Image: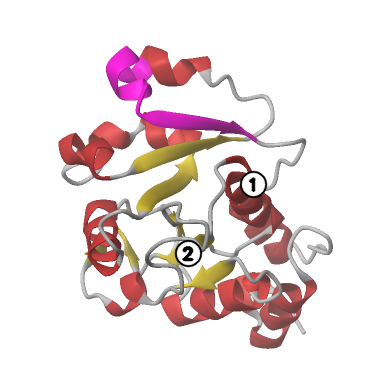
Amino acid sequence: MSSQGKRRDGAAVRVAIMGGTFDPIHYGHLIAAEEARLRFHLDEVVFMPCGQPAHKPSYEVTPAEERYLMVVLATASNPHFSVSRLEIERPGPSYAIDTIRRLKAQLEPHAELFFITGADAILEIETWHKNGQLLEECRFVAVARPGYDLQRLEERLGPEQASRVARLQLPGVDISSTELRARLAAGESIRYLTPQPVADYIAKRQLYGATA
């Protein structure tokens, strides 16, 4: 993470965590990060592949090192993006509250920290570890895919908590890691759904049932 204190113009540096399993990373993740960077004037977006997902999904997660390397490949061309090993090197389940506090400790006191995640995930924030403290720690950005009604946030969270969550509606891009895994398992192409270096890595390592 390169941004810590103040910008040259004296304004506080703004850093965002982009958390997720990234299994695999795809253009939807990258577009969300770039849209958030532009909308909220972020200096840096730190991609944070989780180690052991706290909410264990219904499939066996790809090894953390593989997912980390795919994120590095996907983000290498953007100087405003970086990738952290914090969660994959920390033992035990990955909790957002621990990651947020760890990064805040690395930033200067006047720096601003954001946490970018999907609107669907925000709706489940009551199930997150130490959820009552999360929205006090940093500013959350809820990213909604096309067709998602952001009004649902206020209905679910209530006006007070919803006011602490910034909303970001993505342009017409509807891609999911689940879709990519299904395509690869079926022997179908993922071209133009993820950066080519990631697709090449998946084929080389024969991940998700892909064949080289």
* Crowd tier of the residue under label 2, counting other residues whose Cα lies within 10 Å: few below 14, some 14–19, many 20 or above: many
Q: In the rendered view, how is the structure colored?
A: secondary structure
150 sits to left or right of 60: right
Instruction: Give the residue type at disc 2.
Output: Val
Q: Quadrant of residue 16?
A: bottom left
Residue on which the image places disc 1: 38
Residue 61 percent coordinates (x, y) = 44, 66
Against 49, is 69 above or below?
Answer: below
In the rendered image, residue 41 lying in the magenta stretch gets the answer no
Amino acid type shown at disc 1: Leu
Query: Is 39 drawn above or below residue 149 in the view shown?
Result: below
Numbered disc 1: secondary structure: helix
Q: Which mark is residue 65?
A: none
Name the residue carrying label 2.
Answer: 46
Camera-side residue: 180 or 144? 144
Task: Say which residue appears at 47% left-offset and 34% top-offset.
Answer: 120
